[in-house]
């Protein structure tokens, strides 16, 4: 009915690539297959007990069931500001430079909605976590991409990054207003040095753009690597905001708690749009998030250690199965180049075949952008035993294709 009525905004969104693998995964499971699922960055562990207990205790109170504060309850905003002070020695005004969001994904969608004029350009390195670009596209903006280059140890080639970014600024018309960066990076796991942020803040001031930095995986680092924050750069608040999420560090993905901090103009825009769109997270969730940020951080270390260990198990087991991978320093993922004998398939076909023929689900790199197509992303959300089982299945799968060569 009403074929003449078109929804232009939604038409700008392609079909979610991951949905195709997701549908196939469900079909395999319905057919009785035990699928080993590395496809989503959805932590498999429990939320730490002290956080769950706080939720129950708080939900029993009678004064917490009404509408909450859309930008975050005051105690949570102070906890966010204190978290930055402790971790990065950065001072943030809880009321004007911090905002709590319903997960950081919601924050990206609404921040872009609040700050994008029709035709505005945002720069997003490719591959990328999809909302970083689609938040701007959905809001009526345009996205310019360039390939994120990093070495075999997952260090971003920072000189190359700035050459590419300078080129984008020379070539784009209109000039970009926003640059999104995300390190440790999803999906590639690539990391940067603190100097990277010094350089991007200087460039932002010179070229007059805002930087939006995502440190969702900031806590999940190994072998002594410490995630730098753009907020550590003196004067960063003039040109930058940064987001963080409780989803990964505290196994709270389903709770939907994240936050943005930094430049008061951008934070104010996000606070304002949220005041029109929502009434805030359920207060007991905000109280529990406050406890998570202020409380003992051993749980974060335990979660990090688990991913570190699983990565080692996976690299060892997959290596023995013929899929050679190198250890990274951060995130809950492995960004895996597709083995040579099946590289011609591209990431979507390879992921589908791996699922149907080996009962192993991964995220095809193409879902993160055109430069991801030679890779798949493996989320470390299965236990050691199942990682080893996956390796066995993959060994048999690869043997079939090696023989076809
Ligand atoms: C880089 C990055 N940013 C943000 C998010 C969103 O997390 P949430 O909405 O759960 O806070 C994710 C989730 O996977 C992510 O990978």
Image (cartoon, grey):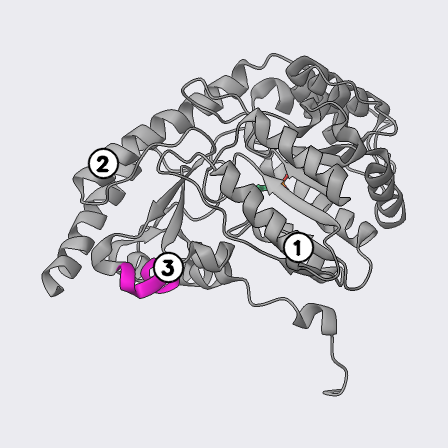
Ligand 1 is found in the corner quadrant, namely top right
Q: Horizontal and vertical percent for residue 217?
A: 55, 32
Side of 51 relative to 5 (left or right): left
Q: CA distance from mark 2 to mark 3?
A: 21 Å
Tell me: residue 225, above or below residue 363.
Answer: above
Quadrant that contains the N terminus: bottom right
Q: Secondary structure at mark 2?
A: helix
Q: Which residues are magenta?
A: 343-351
> Residue 317: which disc?
2
- State how far apart marks 1 and 2 are (Cα): 46 Å
Image disc number at residue 9: none
In the rendering, at what x and y percent does residue 367 appear?
A: 49, 58
SS label for mark 3: helix
Q: Residues within 10 Å of mark 2 (few under 14, many from 20)?
A: many
Q: Position of residue 169 (x, y in %)?
A: 67, 52
Task: Give the residue at mark 1.
Answer: 170
Q: Is residue 289 visible?
A: yes
Residue at the spot x=56%, y=49% of the render?
164
Residue pointed to by mark 3: 347
């Amino acid at each position: 009915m009403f074929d003449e009525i078109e929804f232009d905004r939604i038409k700008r969104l392609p079909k979610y690539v991951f949905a195709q693998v997701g549908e196939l995964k469900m079909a395999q499971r319905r057919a009785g297959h035990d699928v080993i699922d590395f496809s989503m960055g959805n932590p498999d562990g429990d939320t730490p007990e002290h956080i769950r207990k706080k939720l129950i205790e708080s939900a029993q109170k009678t004064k917490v069931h009404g509408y909450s504060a859309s930008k975050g309850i005051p105690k949570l905003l102070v906890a966010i500001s204190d978290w930055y002070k402790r971790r990065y020695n950065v001072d943030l005004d809880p009321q004007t430079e911090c905002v709590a969001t319903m997960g950081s994904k919601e924050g990206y969608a609404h921040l872009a909605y609040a700050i994008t004029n029709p035709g505005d350009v945002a720069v997003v390195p490719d591959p990328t976590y999809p909302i970083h670009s689609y938040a701007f596209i959905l809001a009526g903006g345009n996205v310019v991409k360039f390939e994120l280059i990093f070495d075999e140890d997952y260090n971003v080639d920072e000189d190359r990054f700035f050459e590419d970014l300078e080129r984008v600024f020379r070539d784009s018309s209109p000039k970009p207003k926003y640059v999104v960066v995300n390190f440790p990076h999803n999906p590639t796991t690539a990391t940067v040095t603190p100097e990277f942020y010094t350089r991007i803040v200087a460039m932002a001031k010179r070229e007059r753009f805002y930087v939006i930095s995502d440190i969702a995986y900031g806590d999940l680092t190994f072998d002594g690597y410490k995630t730098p924050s753009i907020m550590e750069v003196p004067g960063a608040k003039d040109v930058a905001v940064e987001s963080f999420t409780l989803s990964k560090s505290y196994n709270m993905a389903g709770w939907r708690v994240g936050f943005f901090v930094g430049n008061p103009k951008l934070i104010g825009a996000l606070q304002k749009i949220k005041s029109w769109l929502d009434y805030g997270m359920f207060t007991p969730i905000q109280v529990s998030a406050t406890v998570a940020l202020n409380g003992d951080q051993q749980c974060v270390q335990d979660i990090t250690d688990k991913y570190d260990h699983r990565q080692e198990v996976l690299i060892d087991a997959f290596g023995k199965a013929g899929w050679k991978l190198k250890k990274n320093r951060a995130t809950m993922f492995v960004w895996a180049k597709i083995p040579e004998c099946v590289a011609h398939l591209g990431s979507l076909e390879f992921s589908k075949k791996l699922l149907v023929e080996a009962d192993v689900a991964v995220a095809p790199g193409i879902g993160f952008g055109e430069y991801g197509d030679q890779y798949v992303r493996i989320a470390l959300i299965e236990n050691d035993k199942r990682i080893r089982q996956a390796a066995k299945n993959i060994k048999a799968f690869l043997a079939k294709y090696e023989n076809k060569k």
